[in-house]
Image (cartoon, grey):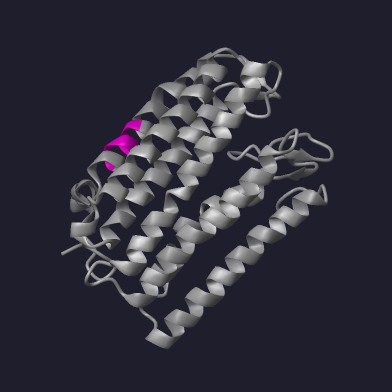
């Protein structure tokens, strides 16, 4: 029986539970976290910068973000009935997810090593094509949430609570709609900044003077973690209250994400 919200493993057992749910994605995510070590080391040694930020900042952020995404995906595979996790559709989806992320990270790291931009770079026809291929890879990565959400809805693990199942599905689909949608819009622009651009918000690197389209993209992409986390936090409340909290929380999160997008279009920096 799958370990779900109603049966949380001990801390020591969590890595083994992750492997049991989806071994390929778990190993891939762990490898990405290990690769963070040399990349962060390079950022302290290599003095080169792009727009005032270390050339290795983008590879580091993407390594961490993609690791979080694939590990989240691997964990959520445990919410699908065991006999449905190895269907041809899910095996292909996992394979595409890994391949698309490897391509994305390889190109970002290659460009960083050469002191060049990977995003918004159309300096040559080749760079423009590679940027377009990166966009296609992102669509595959985000779109992989759809078959997972479908299987959790249609073929859930036996002891998965209905309200928590709804929260996981809502988070996965909001990531597709908001994270993917705002990402597509941003990729069509000449850059992520709107209006004046100066300064960098610590850790995130967001524009501190004008608008930054990456903010809405960030919130949209992480809906898949935020909404299920909300459902976990309210698990001790009675059932009707849990449903209300999840529905209102999902709506509020979506509204916040859209608000940061509008704020960026108005050339105003985040936070509000």
Q: Residue furthest left?
A: 1
Q: Which quadrant would the N terminus be assigned to in this image?
A: bottom left
Q: Nearer the viewer, residue 229 or 149?
A: 149
Task: Look at the image and tell me whether residue 135 can be seen.
Answer: yes
Residue drawn where x is 43% and y is 80% of the image: 242
Q: Quadrant of residue 169?
A: bottom left
Q: Is residue 235 visible?
A: no
Query: Residue 170, position in %: x, y?
Result: 47, 66
Quadrant where the C terminus sits is: bottom right
- Horizontal side of 18 relative to 213 (left or right) equals left
The image quadrant of residue 203 is top right
Up the image or down, 46 lies above or below 6; here it is: above
Query: Which is nearer the eye, 220 or 93?
Result: 93
Work out which residue is located at the far front of the displayed protein and give it.
Answer: 88
Task: Decide: is 235 above or below 271.
Answer: below
**Magenta stretch secondary structure, dominant:** helix
Where in the figure is residue 9, as x and y percent of width and height?
21, 59
Q: Residue at x 28, y 71 (%)?
A: 160
Q: Is residue 158 left or right of residue 147?
A: left
Which residues, given as a range, are shown in magenta? 26-31
Against 14, residue 54 (above or below) is: above
Q: Is residue 42 magenta?
A: no
Residue 10 coordinates in the image, percent (x, y): 20, 58
Seen at 71% across and 18% down, the residue is: 123
Across the whole image, how many numbered discs are drawn on residues? 0
Please check the rendered image and state whether residue 29 is part of the magenta-colored stretch, yes or no: yes
- In the rendering, at what x and y percent does residue 134 appear? 55, 31
């Amino acid at each position: 029986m799958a370990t779900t919200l109603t049966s949380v493993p001990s801390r020591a057992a969590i890595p083994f539970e992750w492997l049991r749910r989806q071994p390929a994605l778990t190993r891939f995510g762990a490898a990405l976290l290990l690769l963070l070590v040399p990349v962060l080391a390079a950022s302290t040694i290599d003095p080169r910068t792009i727009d005032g930020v270390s050339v290795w900042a983008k590879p580091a952020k993407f390594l961490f973000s993609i690791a979080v995404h694939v590990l989240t995906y691997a964990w959520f595979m445990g919410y699908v009935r065991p006999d449905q996790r190895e269907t041809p559709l899910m095996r292909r989806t996992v394979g595409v997810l890994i391949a698309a992320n490897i391509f994305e990270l390889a190109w970002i790291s290659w460009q960083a090593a050469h002191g060049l931009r990977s995003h918004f770079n159309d300096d040559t026809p080749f760079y423009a094509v590679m940027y377009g291929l990166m966009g296609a890879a992102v669509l595959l990565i985000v779109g992989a949430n759809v078959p997972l959400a479908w299987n959790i809805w249609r073929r859930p693990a036996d002891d998965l609570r209905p309200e928590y199942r709804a929260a996981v599905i809502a988070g996965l689909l909001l990531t597709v709609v908001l994270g993917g949608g705002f990402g597509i819009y941003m990729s069509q622009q000449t850059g992520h900044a709107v209006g004046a651009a100066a300064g960098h918000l610590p850790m995130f690197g967001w524009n501190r003077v004008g608008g930054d389209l990456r903010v809405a993209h960030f919130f949209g992409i992480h809906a898949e973690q935020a909404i299920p986390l909300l459902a976990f936090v309210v698990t001790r409340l009675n059932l009707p209250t849990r449903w209300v909290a999840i529905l209102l929380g999902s709506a509020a999160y979506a509204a916040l994400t859209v608000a940061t997008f509008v704020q960026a279009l108005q050339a105003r920096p985040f936070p509000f």
